[in-house]
Amino acid sequence: MAKSAPIRESVTSINEDGSRNFLRPADVAGKFTLWRRLVALPMILIYVLLPWIPINGYPAVFFDLANRRFHLFGLTFAAEDMWIAFFVITGLGFTLFFITALFGRLWCGWACPQTVFLEHVYRRVERWLEGDALKQRKLDKMPWNRPEKVLRRGTKYVIFLLLSLLIANIFLSYFISIPELWGYMLDGPFEHFESFLFVATSTAVLFFNFGWFREQLCIFICPYGRLQSALIDDESMVIGYDEKRGEPRGPVSKDNIGDCINCQRCVSVCPTGIDIRQGLQIECIGCANCIDACDAIMDKVGRPRGLIRYDSLNGLAGKTRRIVRPRLFAYLALLAIGAAVMLYAATHLKPANMTLIRMPGSPYYVDTEAVRNQYLVRLINKRNQPMSFDLSLSNAPEGMQLVGYDEPLVLQPMQEVQQPFIVQQPRHAYTGEARLTVTAHGEPGDFTLTREVPFLGPDPRLIAPSPQTATED
Ligand code: SF4
Ligand code: SF4
């Protein structure tokens, strides 16, 4: 009777002497491989095309760092709107928690950029140039003075470098836009040295990661991989091996043994080099390669598919499956809060922003006529058309006036202005400090922005007219 594989105590990609065991996973075909490709292709296209698609005059996703704006599918967020980012990030985090609790590492295997680019771009180029895993290993052993190695591996690295350069440039275009990026290229690297340095560094990191580091990033660096053990329970859907059905494993010719023929095909296709038959492991990125590999073997030996499959640990152990669990409701509630805030923010986002601060210097001025305070208003037009703003005071105390604005302020598209203004109150009407509401009425769109500021002044008794002066008046 064949024995189970011994439990592994080290990382598959590191040899006993500490050197790197460079994995060469075998190619695989099957329904999950096909579906993963069909998911990956649009994702790559979306990444490449988003900076090219204009909406309201800006790329669909554009982090305009120079002007501190963020354009997202026609909505414009200014630096002041960045509180929304907190809900976006936490909302995405809880979405990931929810998906992980329900479907395990679906994200890692199907949608993570590391997997998408490595499996569907870089490894495809590698297999095209170097052949299957066997030929790649042969090439590994070949000395560098052999023309075949120089030609095949050299061409591969040149293509990897170009791909990394392309991905890095597209990434930069999310921050400076495609026309600007093109302008930078025409100007030459030393005209925009910071951007050049960013692209050069990103290219080097991508080349190193996809050319050499690969699964090490998932195993040693990615925090999500570590988090999964806390997020997954016995009811989460994972990729697992049906031990009850598969063991004892052995050759197909033997009687009274399990369905696993111990062909090692599931191990040879694994991009992290693990043996799924040893149970759920932190290195498993949920790519489903082992499912397709094992299903093909089961087809060949005339046994039912699904020896390795998507299932919960309880399902694999033959226990009752329970998809709905309390923790899912907790994640869902937190996710719903984040989504509701995002929806509210997106639908109530004003087309302009206003901030109001006091001018530096003396907090107030008193002369023979009035008590005065000076402020600075900062207005940002987030629309792609000119807008005018009327500033006024709402619910102002008696006699209080906003001066310095006879004409509405006109702002060009995406323009930001800072203007000082004065609020004054006649001495005879002054009764002490107050809180003011400053309103900016914007057109077109008939919307208002309001901000509260304090109006400061001396103790009113200090500036009250003397009884004699009052009689003379
Ligand atoms: S591919 Fe299937 S049959 Fe072959 S070793 Fe893996 S689990 Fe066993
Ligand atoms: S064990 Fe299977 S699902 Fe997990 S990484 Fe390896 S091949 Fe992919």
Image (cartoon, grey):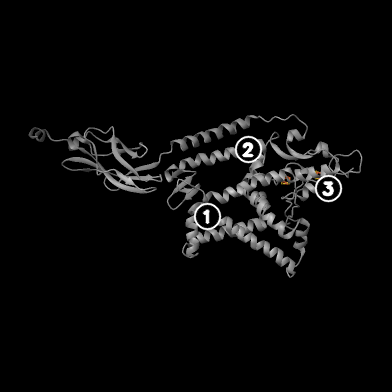
* Place of residue 258 in the rendered image (x, y in percent of width and height, measured from the top left): 86, 39
Q: Which residue is mark 3?
A: 263
Q: Secondary structure at mark 1?
A: helix
* Place of residue 71 in the rendered image (x, y in percent of width and height, measured from the top left): 47, 46
In space, the residues marked 2 and 1 are separated at their CA atoms by 30 Å
Q: Residue furthest left?
A: 472
In space, the residues marked 3 and 1 are separated at their CA atoms by 46 Å
Q: Secondary structure at mark 3?
A: loop
| Ligand 1 occupies quarter | top right
Q: Which residue is mark 2?
A: 99
Quadrant of the image occupied by residue 152: bottom right
Q: Quadrant of the N terminus?
A: top right
Q: Quadrant of the C terminus?
A: top left
Q: Earlier in the sequence, mark 3 or mark 1?
A: 1
Mark 2 packing: few (<14 Cα in 10 Å), some, or many (20+)?
Answer: many
Q: Give 142 or 10, whichever is nearer the viewer.
A: 142
In space, the residues marked 2 and 3 are separated at their CA atoms by 33 Å
Q: Earlier in the sequence, mark 2 or mark 3?
A: 2
Q: Is mark 1 within 8 Å of ligand 2?
A: no
Q: Are marks 3 and 1 in contact (CB under 8 Å)?
A: no
* Place of residue 441 in the rendered image (x, y in percent of width and height, measured from the top left): 33, 38
Q: Give 61 or 332, whichever is nearer the viewer.
A: 61
Question: Measured along the vertical axis of the image, is residue 134 above or below residue 3?
Answer: below
Mark 1 packing: few (<14 Cα in 10 Å), some, or many (20+)?
Answer: many
Q: Which residue is mark 1?
A: 172
Does the image show residue 225? Answer: no
Q: Is mark 3 within 8 Å of ligand 1?
A: yes
Residue type pointed to by label 1: Leu
